[in-house]
Image (cartoon, coloured by chain):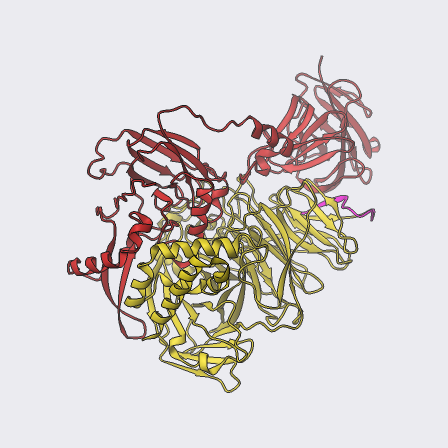
Chain colours: A red, B yellow
Amino acid sequence: MKKSHEWLCTLTGHHSIAMAKPEVGIGGGGKLSARIIMQNTRARGWECGSIAAAVCLIAIARAPAADKPHDHREHLPANTAPRSPDAPPPAGYEKVDHELVIGTVPGRMVYDTAFVRVRPGAKVKLVLKNNDDMQHNLVICNPGQDVGLTVSQAAWALGADALAKHFVPDSPLVLHHTLIVNPHQADTIYFTAPRDEGDYPFVCTLPGHVFTMAGVMQVGKGGKSAAPRGELRKREADWYYVRVTDRPRVVRCSMPDSSSRSIAVGLPGGTSYCFDAEGCFVRYGWTGEFLDAGPDRGRGNSRGGGANRPLGERCNVGTNGFPLRIGSSDTPKVVFRGYRTEPAPVFLYSVDGVEVAQSIAPARSGIGLTYTFELPQTPLGPVRFIVDTTGVATTSDAGEFENGRLTIPADRARKFSVTIVEAK
Amino acid sequence: MKFPANNVKNILRKGAKAQRNPEKAKLSLCAFAPLREFSFHWPFAPSRLCVESSAALTFAMVILQLSFCNFLHAQPSIIPPGYSVETIPTPPGVDFEVGGIGFLPDSSLLVTTRHGDVWRRHESTGEWSLYAEGLHEPLGIWVDPRNGDAYIAQRAELTRLVDEDKDGDADLYQTVCADWGFSGNYHEYAFGPVRDSAGNFYVTLNLSHSTERVVGETEMGNSAPFRGWCVRISPDGKMTPIASGMRSPAGIGISRDDELFYTDNQGGYNATSGLYHILPGRFFGHPNSLYDDPRFAGRDLASIPLENLDALRTLPAIWIPHGELANSPGEPVFDNTSGKFGPFAGQLFVGDQTKSNLMRIALEKVGGEYQGAIFNFIDPLDSGVIRNAFAPDGSLYVGMTARGWGSIGAKPFSLQRIIYDGKTIPFEMHTVSLTRTGFDITFTKPADPATAAGTERYLVRHWGYKYQPAYGSPKVDETFVLPQAVTLSVDGKTVHLDLPLVPRRVYQLLLVNITSTAGEKLTTPTAYYTLNRLRE
């Protein structure tokens, strides 16, 4: 099977299949040594490899006298300026049939496009836009089983050559490729699509990336579509949904409308809540299933870091910042101390130097939560509890609320409960 | 200068044989892997031509080598004699992406996973039980040998896990310190802790992948206080930021003498990955962390010239060449096993997430600062290596995860254990030490003078790196050197190389077919020495 293997050296403006230049350098040992650097002897792969030496020698003979010692490798290391999409195209590509932009998704180890289609023999401009925080490339391969993996493995075996070769092995399986693209940069290549119809895999050949950074460039007039994703979604739900059965579940994570130091708690019976460990108070509750931990934990090959998703209907618990006042201060200093998990979660924090333990249970009637506060000793003065009463009903075993404020006498404040439910 | 051509011809001949008879040739191809690694920069024209003229053959060799050495075998292709790898079965159905490894007083293993569990493996039965759950990507653990309390750095805080009711799992999750900033960005990892002899804990904090508080055109930001710092946390929970300039300080280690080291990953302001010696007040090069340094309060950090930052920074004790040895190194651990783990007591072992290998580091002090040599040790393991811990029996547990970056080890996660047989002395470079005139390479056992005494047996090249906001750095001004003189000591264990020395360079030493007196080959014939300072 013969394919078109022309390689456009848009970087240097050459359209040669092999380049070689003699270089004279002074070695560190003070000895003069001649060095020959060749690169990208890719044309026609197998066939050309055997004649590369001859090509090389011819090239040496024809190499013009360089103004100064010049090493082509300098064009290729990883920090090479990428080829801008706006730079003038090489000859013959002033008009292209397809302009493709493939990006990388930050933190996910995937391309944002897994499937592109081009017409046989079409002129293609392809931009790889790297939105990630690490280096990537894009290598289009000839069709075949596991070709992307085979090419990647050959790239990983390049050893000291790998960076200079942009993780592209000398392989007949490689059709076209970008340079290594640094974070937040892009690289542009121009090529003529193969005349043979088929599915041409593209992959990132940096070490280990192929397992998730892979797609297909389909050469043809249409018909096939990208792989169905429904099955994958179902599997992801099984993996990342945290389910509550007979015991409470406690998950530290980022949560929506709360700080990144949040704790999601799911209680048996279908009530859950979000405790903000930075502010030491409950932000909200919800009823239904517990938690999709995929966003923060990292779905698939993702690095995670997103806010997790409560799986249910949110309920208002009248939160208006940190609710407790112990002593006279209206801006208490609150320090999170941690939590106990058995038999049910109890949160520990200090309020203006007074240690508090707060347990949280579903309200016995209505949709809401009951908080039980315990102090280690009788406080010096009354304790206040402040809530935003909009849309909620509040009760307590320690007194009556007035305008969203409950004042508990010191001698009653060692242990008291507050229940907040959604108003009917 | 006649040696390389013959060697290369040999390789090619064997490669050709391999094509005809792959099964038979598999060993010889593996053995030549290090030479192939070197071939691209081969400084001598004739051999260079030979190598290039057989591009197809080279490709065939690569494929053969991959097929027969790396990917079908459970065992690594590089492993010193006397060492073996055991894969520990992990709890079924659990994404066992290892974040930290520790040992309870009864020797049972505690492993934190990136999804937030802590699993306990019972020493006697090998069975796993859930010790704690729901932590926020815990990436390290230190277990108090006196009482079994586990200290764990989560993204949000340093936590002490206590089994108060002694029923075999933790029930108190106590916040020790939550004073560092955490915006929620995925890149804001917290690594550690390690603990010093005074009871202080140390945690390293990644920069954010963001555009907030950024100096220069670089990919990382600083979205919350003390990103890019190492912080010290006193036994009573008070936090003191002690050193800055870090990017992705993915591993922290401490010596018996309370000396702190961390590894950083290549990226902006970080030419290639490295191992750094932490001392209070040090700045390691990434300026984004300086937004939280009171000495720079009110300063326009962007206006500070790069050369001033360069002068301010502490160089790594070890540069780890990107793509060759490691792309994202993890936890450095000191071999304090007094020989239970083989002849490298006192040296450091560190793994790499991308390359999935385990490396060995031999440090020395020159001019009062650490520098030294790094060697590939075991390569590859199952998945991306980020955590190592020596077990009480002297074996080394290796914790792995590939998620988020990918790794050459094709499994998504794994837990393996490296075991030394207690008797075999592998033939290795034990240390590479700088002299006033070159290097002393000390072997683990006597080298054969017929192979070790010739200058042509030592291929040396050295290069520098750029300090720049852009991602990483190419090798700068790569230079090839032949030693001017080579002397083997009377006991055959140390070879003295005389060659010109240039500071602030990485020296790669490739030893060509040097054998022990018993004819054993070096498992790893390549050393990378970071020469920051010359000997006075």
In this orientation, which residue lies closer to the viewer: B506 or A375?
B506
Quarter of the rendering containing residue B45: bottom left
In the image, is residue A208 part of the stretch drawn in magenta?
A: no
In the image, residue A204 sits, relative to residue B462, either above or below, namely above
Q: Is residue A351 left or right of residue A230?
A: right
B389 or A331: nearer the eye?
B389
B169 in magenta:
yes
Looking at the image, residue B368 lies above or below residue A22: below
- State which region is magenta: B165-177
Look at the picture and state if A384 lies above or below B13.
Answer: above
> What is the x, y in percent for residue B514?
47, 75
Image side of residue B221 versus residue B419, left or right: left
Residue occupying the far bottom of the picture: B490
Task: Please give the count of numbered marks on the rendered protein.
Answer: 0
Q: Which quadrant would the C terminus of chain B be assigned to in this image?
A: bottom left
Q: Residue furthest front?
A: B20
In the rendering, at what x and y percent does residue B93 appear? 68, 40
> x and y percent of residue B140 in the render?
63, 51
Nearest the viewer among A249 and B144 is A249
The answer, for residue B139, to whether it is visible in the render is no
Residue A337 image point, x, y percent: 70, 43
Q: Quarter of the image containing the N terminus of chain B?
A: bottom left
Q: Is A358 on the left or on the right of A233, as rendered?
A: right
